[in-house]
Amino acid sequence: MTSDRQARARSSRATPHWIAPPFASGPTAGLGCDCCGLSRRDFLQLTGLFSASLGATLAVGGCQPTQGPAQSSPAASAPATPTAQPPVKIGYLPITDAAPLLVAHARELYQAEGLTAEKPTLFRSWPQVVEAFLARQVNVIHILMPATLWLRYGRKFPAKIVAWNHTNGSALTVLPEINRLEDLGGRKVAVPFWYSIHNVVLQQLLKKAGLKVVRRPKEAKVAANEVNLIVLPPPDMVSALANQAIAGYIVAEPFNAAAENLKTGKILRFTGDVWKDHACCVVLMHEDDLTQHPDWAQRVVQAIVKAQHWSGENRAGVAEILSKEGGKYTPHPKAALIRALTAYDPAVYQAQGAIAHPDWQIDRIDFQPYPFPSYTAELVRLLKETQVEGETQFLQDLDPEWVAQDLVDDSLVKAALAAVGGPAAFRLPENLTRKETIAL
């Protein structure tokens, strides 16, 4: 392991800057941060938002079904303009999953590809970023990968995954006195969204520990063998853990690193140590942008791939770009970002059980763009047995192997890899295939 990978930021007890900041100028200014999370109310609002937005786009653009099962054919979005190359308009939340999109902007990699790139737009919640995407206010977003299944097949909206953002980069953070999964029995644990890899991994872990997952109001009592899962925005997670209102949370970085630096929580398990090199958020584009502006889409993906390649070798540089002290793309202090990007020392984390597989030789966060079909297929299978909110019949109707081909367009990444030295530049197999490794 490199010294960069083992570097650790000094702890700080200062109140996190991101608890209630005015993130951006313009319409989102002063709204605070929902970051990676949704409340139950937000979830219901987002459901209504999708329904209203899709009704509007159907009225404007009609229906253009994709190939595959009839019940999974997405409705058309408002059509892209076929005659002009659109500017790159990024929508993002202030989490490390957005790093490749933001690094590409900060390092002017979009411009280097001959593109026009607007300043990325920071949103305070998933409903806001999705609404902007549906309305074409933004055309390149990062989004939780399980949520793309809900969007394309549950809500029938034509969007495609074109790349991964980064791998691993999430963890289960708990109160300092909790040492085993079994210690979570009878308590509340927060997830950022039902359709998230966090919810999927957590439910698998709890099942293995013999604990029953329930979804009840926050105030409800639960039995000793039950764990009540609730949805909280990440900043609320950090404060709720500090106040012992919850026993733990599972979420993307840098919120786990923040609790470590504040000494209000510890990592019970890294998700990358459960599902090796899994994706969390992915890059999503409108499907008709891929068909009507294929050269534009290719150049966008090339810029993102180059940003990922640079990020893997320049983690301190990524922290500087993302931090409130540096590029000001997020409100997070540099110390939390440095820890999230580099602190994965087995000597430290094996002792507390956070790392069970040091032989995997992975990073706390790593960067690679290729969307392995095997991962998509396995995710569909696991979502079928994961408790989520709302109507889930569409999940049961999905064929995992078909989804792996229909949801993802990997042709752009394959072409972009050549510009950085091929798959080997990211330590990927030349045939771009793998077998999923999950060890609870």
Image (tube, rainbow, N blue to C red):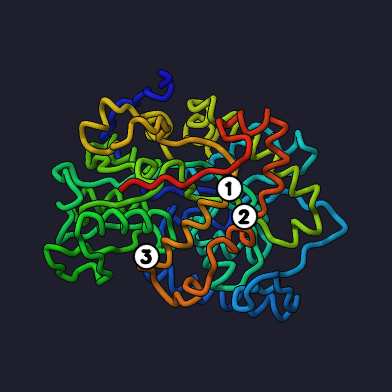
**In the picture provided, is 149 more to the left or to the right than 392?**
right
Q: CA distance from mark 3 to mark 2?
A: 22 Å
Of all residues, the one furthest to the left in this rendering is 224
- In the depicted structure, whether residue 388 falls above or below residue 425: below
Determine which of the numbered discs, if any, sits on residue 161 in the image.
Answer: 2
Badge 3 vs badge 2, beta-carbon distance below 8 Å: no
Badge 2 vs badge 1, beta-carbon distance below 8 Å: yes
Q: Which residue is mark 1?
A: 371
Relative depth, front residue between 56 and 326: 56
Q: Which residue is mark 3?
A: 386
* Residue 437 visible within the image: yes
Quarter of the picture holding the N terminus: top left
For label 3, the SS is loop
Determine which of the numbered discs, if any, sits on residue 313 in the image.
Answer: none
For label 2, the SS is strand
Instruction: Indicate which disc, 2 or 1, sits on the residue closer to the N terminus.
Output: 2
